Amino acid sequence: MVTERLREIAEKTVQYAKKQKVDQAQASAFLVDSSLTRFANSQIHQNVAEKSGGISVKVILNKRISTIRVGTLEEEEIKKAVAEAVKIAKASSPNKEFKSLPEPEKWSPIKGAFDEETANCEPKYRAEKVREAIETAHSRSPDVKAVAGYFSTGSMAYAVANLLGVSAWADMSVAYMKTTVISKSGTSEGFGTAEKYSRRIKDIKPSLLAEDAAEKSVKSINPVKLNPGEYEVVLSPLAVATLLMFTGFGFSATAYQDGQSFVKYNLNQQVFDSKLTVKDDARDSKTLYAVPVDGEGVPKKVLELIDKGFVSEKSICYNSFTAGKENKKSTGHAVLPIGDYYGERPMPSNGIVKAGDATLEEAIAETKHGIFITTVHYVNPVEPIKVILTGLTRDGTFLIENGEISKPILNMRFTDSMLSAFKNIPMIGKQVEMVRSTTVPMMKLKKLRFVGISAY
Amino acid sequence: MSSNFGKIALEEAEKKGASYADIRISEILNENLTVKNGNPETVSLSQEKGFGVRVIVNGAWGFAGSVDMNKEEIQKTVERAVSIAEASALLKKKEAVLAREKPRKDKYVTSFKKDPFKVSLGQKLDVLIQAGRILKEQSQLIKASYAHYHGFRENKLFMSTEGAEINQQITWCGGGLSAIAVKGGEMQTRSYPSAFRGDFSTSGYEFFESLALVDHAKEIGQELLKLFEAEKCPSGEMNLILHGDQLALQIHESCGHPTELDRALGTEADYAGTSFLTPEKLKSFRYGSEKVNIVADATVSRGLGTFGYDDEGAQAKKVYLIKEGIFAGYQSSRETAAELNLKESSGGMRADSPLALPIIRMTNINLLPGNWKVEEIVEDTKDGILVTTNRSWSIDDRRINFQFGTEIGWRIKNGSRDNMIKNPTYMGVTPQFWGSCDAVSKDDWKMWGTPNCGKGVPGQVMYVGHGCGTARFCKVRVGLMK
């Protein structure tokens, strides 16, 4: 078992550190095995596999903290890394805000997080599924000109140990596929996209994705211009996921403590529509990243991020460092060891929106004059306290008139506060979809502010 | 870096039927220091080593990489790359063809005076702690101050079955300051010398020293506090003057990305997007005014995107992307250059790790100096705004419609800098925007380093440079916040 090997390495590593008389030490060993087949212009153009592993070693000496991360699991290299971490800590300055690494807590593995078939998928299988997607999309219409996308399969595992007795591990598999279809009629192009994420490869149905993307693509040829302004919008789960992910930055203890979080200024207030309830729960079968412990080996707690529109102190995600600053316990939201070395801010990574009772068809039927958005592109925060985001619609934007999708429209730029956008949600979908770190339904918003129009 | 290791891989690939193969063996060091509120928050050194093998089998590409540097793993990894290529070939519409590139045997090292990896950690932290504390002490309204340092080194060996064997060492470093202040539910931020953790250069520690973070900490803190009292950004159409650090990002997003040939040929259609600069527009499309000359130049001294050879062995070069306002060229790879019957690759293939596949990336995308002095641009402006330091950015997937926000700005009235303005934002349409460029400075031209350009699936983060000064754009829509 991979996790047993990683656990052994992590536990040995903290013992090497103990011999060097550190106050505290933590080791996180990881292995990633991922493959991705990418296609464009209806052929595979990039096909890659990556097998990487390494260990992150953190040592603390008189509140002097250092981290060394090496891309190897070789014993001699790890010993060198520990020695280097101790050397760096000695040369560093104390961080007075540091309290302690986490104490051990009870935890248990998550059943169904790892799927052998997904972890060991062969390139030929992915190529065959890509072919299925391409052929399906082209078969939908002669206007389909090109199919692009990617199909990724793989697994990751990590184990964390510290000198206070933490020893925990996780392994999981992930498969995802995206299909983007480009159509053309005369000089006008149309675009459509569909995505699917799962822990199990068998849930990925390329032909369904291709049909969905192709239908949107063909229907979005010859878009018309809609003037900027405020409109009712029906958001597909892909669009909801992106907007909520950016809103989710406000649940980080780092943002909260630095005064950058909207939660800080709205404690115990109903910020969003009362129909909006979002929890963060890594053990829920509907979430993608099913890991029982975080990057410090702390069991992932269930958090009510948004409870019937209300946010509170209970909405905040902590790691041991940010928790220590408030004399609290970590909620198990430290970044995973395979994460980016740039950021250590705790974040929700298993946000699940409570399903509503509507269907997409009903949401469209209930809209007199509005916009259907398939997905949004290049979204970025403009102002974090009001959660003002800007971005563009993409790959299938349609006008809804008198309860029906009437015509495709040119992509539009929105710049609006998410506190305002999610304040009035007339309808929430009854079906939820895994989309990266969130699990979301479609939603109808009463208004979203658009400030510009793109050229296509 | 062992060339024997590389030879084994290439021989193995040829044995298994590869018509072309290359290998990159690389070791990357990243030293990251972040001091928050005067406390060292991140003191981190990461070391990554491994290799990546690219093969063409049956006319299709395969790639595999591994961190285990032993003979058995080489064979397994080559085998994996070959089986992936065979799978790719099942859906092949055309053969992978490469533009000619002279296989070179060479060594290249970026220059530095003081090796950043030999300067003590204590010395670096002293600067960051001092600067961070000065910044934080300016007011209790300042909720967080950050001081950053980042040092990078990559030693890599590239070898190909065509006979190339190139050793390179790339070293860069830099850093910066930033702070966040909150007053009455309003948040403001200020950074120095640029957003995104500062400024970076292929130089030694002397570059970080030249930023003089401690000397600038008080000024930045004071400027941050003044933003609360500043006027709102005016709303409407007016002259917009972009200072170099914001202009660098404008160039990056609206010229750098759309001139990437992989985007123009559709291979990023599923993620980053395509480009409005499609091949039939090459050499004829008016991208900007005659004042606009933009090059991709991997040879410029101290640029963050400066190197000797790209990751498929193409020599660094300078290529015009926009010449006197006309779309003049693409950033390309050997394969995409061949597809467009271009003579050669522009030398833009780069990977962020030995385990990552090289893709077309920016090198240094530079707006060449014009004829104006910065002072003259301001004096010549009757009504407008001057803005600096990026705060938010967004552009569509063909790189036409953009919106940017900056940390700070000033109203320009009758040729002089008037009141400070807060939350400046502007939006535009790329060819119209660059078409309205009527003044480009010459006296404040410098290289800016952007260490965080994201592209590709799986995602890669690349360090790129942008040379520019200050430029003026006419009739731009500004003030988009409610």
Image (cartoon, coloured by chain):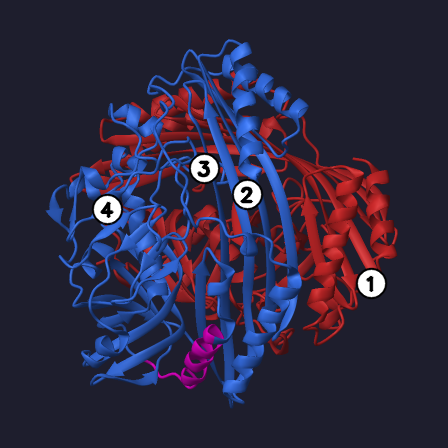
Chain colours: A blue, B red
Q: Are marks 1 and 2 on the same chain?
A: yes
The answer for how far apart the CA atoms under marks 4 and 3 are is: 36 Å
Q: Is residue B346 visible?
A: no
The answer for how far apart the CA atoms under marks 3 and 2 are is: 11 Å
Q: Say which mark, if any, is on residue A305.
A: 4
Q: Amino acid at mark 4?
A: Leu
Can you identify the residue that label 1 sits on? B100
Q: Amino acid at mark 2?
A: Gly
Q: Nearer the viewer, mark 1 or mark 4?
A: 4
**Residue B106 picture location, percent across and down:** 84, 42
**Residue A425 picture location, percent across and down:** 18, 64
Check disc 3: other Cα within 10 Å, few if <14, some if 14-19, many if 20+. Answer: many
Q: Mark 4: which secondary structure? A: strand
N-terminal label among 3 and 2: 3
Can you identify the residue that label 3 sits on? B193
CB under 8 Å between callouts 3 and 2? no
Q: Nearer the viewer, mark 4 or mark 3?
A: 4
**Which of the 4 image quarters holds residue B109?**
top right
Can you identify the residue that label 2 sits on? B449
The answer for how far apart the CA atoms under marks 1 and 4 are is: 56 Å
Q: Amino acid at mark 1?
A: Arg
Check disc 4: other Cα within 10 Å, few if <14, some if 14-19, many if 20+. Answer: many
Q: Nearer the viewer, mark 2 or mark 4?
A: 4
Query: Looking at the picture, does residue B432 appear above or below residue B54?
Result: below
Query: Looking at the picture, does residue B134 appear above or below residue B78?
Result: above
Query: Residue sitting at 63 percent across and 75 percent down?
Result: B279
CB under 8 Å between callouts 4 and 3? no
Q: Are marks 2 and 4 on the same chain?
A: no
Q: Amino acid at mark 3?
A: Pro
